[in-house]
Amino acid sequence: VVADKWISMKDRELEESTMRKHQSRLAKYLLPALGSIAVSDITAPMILKIGEEIQAKGSEHEAHRVVRLCKQILQYATISGLVQYNVAYGVTAGLSRPKTKHRAAPLKDDDIRAVLQRIKKHIGSPQVSICLKLVPHLFMSPIDITTGRWEDIDLENGTWSFKRRKSGVPTIAPLSEYVKSQLVQIRAIYPDSEWVFPSPNKPEQPISSGSLNSALRKVGIEKDDATIHGFRATARTLLVEKFKNRQDIVEQQISHTVKDPNGRAYNRTLFLDERRQMLNEWSEFLCSPLATTH
């Protein structure tokens, strides 16, 4: 009952994909073990046991996610006055810490060239193909790209304004000339769509970020070679080390929270001219034969 109330409350603020994951973990792990127990009778060892069983199957990340989900629901029970304190706090300390695996990001010219050449060979819907080609040129997260709306894009001034889906942070990104040319092309194909990249099967919805990684696999790019999210790491590294751009401008473009010496986060509209120049140089680099020197 408490889980249902929590789900109903969160359904108004979380993404549909996130809610599906929560409901799946509830149905698979938490409700079978705890659903018939009074919320005031749930103990930390009960929760730890669930996490340990998941962990024993080799799913360390999933074990932590499930325990965190349980903690959120029990925190709602605490606030509602059903229990005096949240017994799930600290339970993750009893689980093994998941190993961090960084997303694959090509950094050498030959590796970048190989990935881009394969991307050009993608055969599929124009919205997926064009979106796939644009990802290395944009430092936005995959979900922010795929869920982009035309109302957020100003082609005349070359800007894309949006709120980051995961953090809600307002962001403005300048667009390179190459990106603008590709957006003009996709706009001409789907002139009436509110979405920049409408789904081939459900035009009233955008394509999913997962379809981009699927497209990478389709053209023979393995997970150890490159991922959609990994292109951001490629740009972040090379723009600083190879192209000698200021790190704060690069981080600003990637939409990380960059702060000045007084602790204030930089305004998201700062460095628009510098970032535009940087992005044009980056697009020229990606569209060139990728010579070994710059």
Image (cartoon, rainbow, N blue to C red):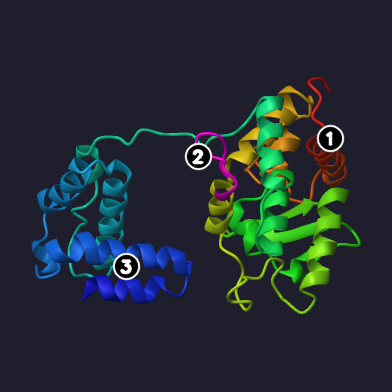
Residue 241 placement (x, y as % from top left): 72, 23
Q: Give the range drawn in magenta.
A: 218-227
Query: Going by the image, does 180 lie left or right of 199?
Result: right
> Of the residues tagged 3 and 2, which is closer to the observer?
2
Q: Which residue is drawn at 57% across and 60% down?
A: 165
Residue 288: assigned label: 1
Query: Going by the image, does 24 lie left or right of 166?
Result: left
Contact (Cβ within 8 Å) of mark 3 with mark 2: no
Secondary structure predominantly adopted by residues drawn in magenta: loop
Question: Closer to the camera, 73 or 214?
Answer: 214
Amino acid type of disc 3? Gln
- Sequence-first tag of 1 and 3: 3
Label 3 sits on residue:
23
Which residue, as the protein is rendered here, is positioned at the far right?
Answer: 156
Residue 291 placement (x, y as % from top left): 81, 24
Q: What element carries label 2?
A: loop
Q: Which residue is drawn at 10% across and 70% down?
A: 36
Label 2 sits on residue:
223
- In the rendered view, tell whether residue 171 sits above or below residue 193: above
Magenta stretch contains residue 82: no
Magenta stretch contains residue 220: yes
Residue 47 placement (x, y as % from top left): 16, 52
Amino acid type of disc 1? Ser
Where the C terminus falls, by quadrant? top right
- Numbered-mark total: 3
Q: Is residue 166 visible?
A: no
- Sequence-first tag of 2 and 1: 2
